Image (cartoon, rainbow, N blue to C red):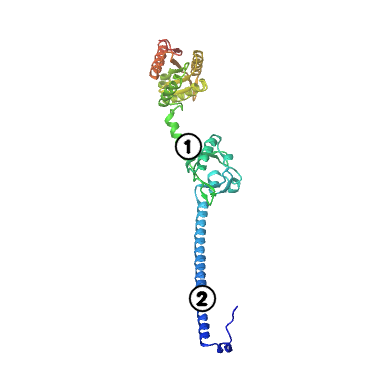
């Protein structure tokens, strides 16, 4: 470190040396001022940076507080999970939606509480998400703590990379069970007879068309149609009233459904007329089903304190043996059935060309 000369030394300097000395001090002062200015600027920059960092930190903390509030208070179930399905965090809504406490649900995996029929669809859905495709309104069932199944609609953003690291897998689930059940109920009502619960005419007609299309592609494909009309039903209605008639129709419907083979479709076409669709049934099987139906229909039906009894007449037509399409199948079965009625009722007959 260089110290300034003593006064006695300055007195010995010549004017030129004194000039040089003063000039050097001026230069040194200028350099110091520049250095001080630079340091002050650096200090201000650091202060500004610190203030900026503090503001950014507060914004992040506010955002985190808002996110935590949303996570805690959301009416929908929120889940953060690993790629393998292990849960990292779940919102309190899991208790309302699935009945588990947060502590009970966290050790589980989604697969362990998922309906078996939904596992494969879910696996494919997760594969799509892993490729960067957002998941929107994906529906599956999870088991409630009480053992019932709840339908959930999932919204799952695809993970993004931040500095080469994938973001956590996040999913939001909305309980749509009531809506799903309502849709299923509406669909059921649209496809079934309100009184008996059997398939209705419109759905049965569609099933016949589909059966013909399936079997028409096979060399030995057979589709048979039975038309059944009750014998003695009008007497029950006239004698005991329509409520008794309705009770008879419900009982007959249940008996017919039980008399068919597994996979046969029984429908109520209207009034006291029923039908049965049978695929791949040889003549012997058709006759066996028809005889079972005749037998169960003849059994007495208890209505309150009384018993009533009805019978039925059955007409049978088969594709492609006699009928080439659905219209012919119905017409031929109908003609066979009325032939039975003309011959004395309570029997079954095949249509013959």
* Residue 150: percent from left, percent from top: 52, 40
Of the 4 image quadrants, the one containing the C terminus is top left
| Residue visible at 50% across and 53% down in the picture | 70
Query: In the rendered image of this protein, does residue 29 appear above or below residue 49?
Result: below
* In the foreground, 49 or 289: 49
User: What is the count of numbered marks?
Assistant: 2
- Tell me which label, 2 or 1, sits earlier in the chain: 2
Of the 4 image quadrants, the one containing the N terminus is bottom right
* Residue 144: percent from left, percent from top: 56, 41
How many C-alpha atoms fall within 10 Å of the one at disc 2: few (<14), some, or many (≥20)? few
Is residue 269 shown left or right of residue 62? left
How many C-alpha atoms fall within 10 Å of the one at disc 1: few (<14), some, or many (≥20)? few
CA gap between label 2 and label 1 equals 84 Å
Tell me if residue 142 can be seen.
yes
Residue 246's label in the rendered image is none
Q: Which residue is mark 2?
A: 31
Residue 181's label in the rendered image is 1
- Helix, strand or loop at label 2? It is helix
Query: In the rendered image of this protein, does residue 252 appear above or below residue 32?
Result: above
* Residue 352: percent from left, percent from top: 42, 10
* Residue 309: percent from left, percent from top: 47, 18
Query: In the rendered image of this protein, does residue 275 appear above or below residue 123?
Result: above
Tell me if residue 150 can be seen.
no
């Amino acid at each position: 470190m260089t110290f300034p000369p003593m006064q006695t030394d300055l007195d010995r300097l010549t004017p030129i040396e004194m000039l040089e000395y003063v000039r050097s001090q001026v230069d040194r002062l200028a350099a110091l001022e520049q250095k001080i200015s630079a340091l002050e600027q650096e200090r201000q920059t650091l202060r500004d940076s610190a203030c900026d960092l503090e503001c950014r930190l507060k914004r992040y903390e506010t955002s985190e507080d808002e996110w935590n509030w949303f996570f805690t208070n959301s009416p929908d179930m929120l889940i953060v999970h690993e790629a393998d399905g292990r849960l990292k965090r779940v919102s309190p809504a899991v208790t309302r939606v699935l009945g588990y406490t947060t502590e009970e649900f966290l050790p589980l995996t989604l697969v362990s509480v998922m309906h078996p029929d939904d596992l494969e669809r879910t696996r494919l859905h997760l594969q799509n998400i892993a490729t960067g495709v957002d998941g929107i309104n994906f529906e599956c069932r999870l088991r409630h703590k009480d053992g019932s199944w709840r339908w959930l609609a999932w919204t799952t953003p695809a993970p993004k990379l931040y500095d080469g690291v994938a973001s956590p897998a996040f999913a939001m689930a909305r309980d749509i069970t009531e809506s799903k059940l309502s849709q299923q109920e509406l669909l059921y009502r649209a496809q079934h007879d309100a009184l008996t619960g059997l398939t209705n005419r419109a759905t049965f007609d569609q099933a016949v068309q589909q059966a013909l299309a399936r079997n028409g592609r096979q060399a030995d494909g057979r589709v048979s149609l039975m038309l059944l009309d009750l014998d003695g039903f009008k007497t029950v209605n006239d004698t005991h009233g329509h409520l008794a008639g309705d009770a008879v129709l419900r009982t007959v419907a249940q008996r017919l459904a039980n008399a068919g083979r597994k996979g046969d479709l029984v429908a109520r076409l209207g009034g006291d007329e029923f039908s049965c669709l049978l695929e791949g049934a040889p003549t012997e099987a058709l006759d066996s089903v028809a005889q079972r139906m005749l037998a169960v229909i003849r059994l007495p039906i208890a209505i309150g304190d009384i018993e009533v009894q009805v019978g039925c007449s059955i007409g049978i037509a088969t594709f492609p043996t006699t009928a080439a399409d659905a219209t012919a199948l119905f017409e031929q079965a109908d003609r066979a059935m009325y032939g039975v009625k003309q011959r004395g009722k309570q029997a079954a007959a095949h249509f013959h060309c």
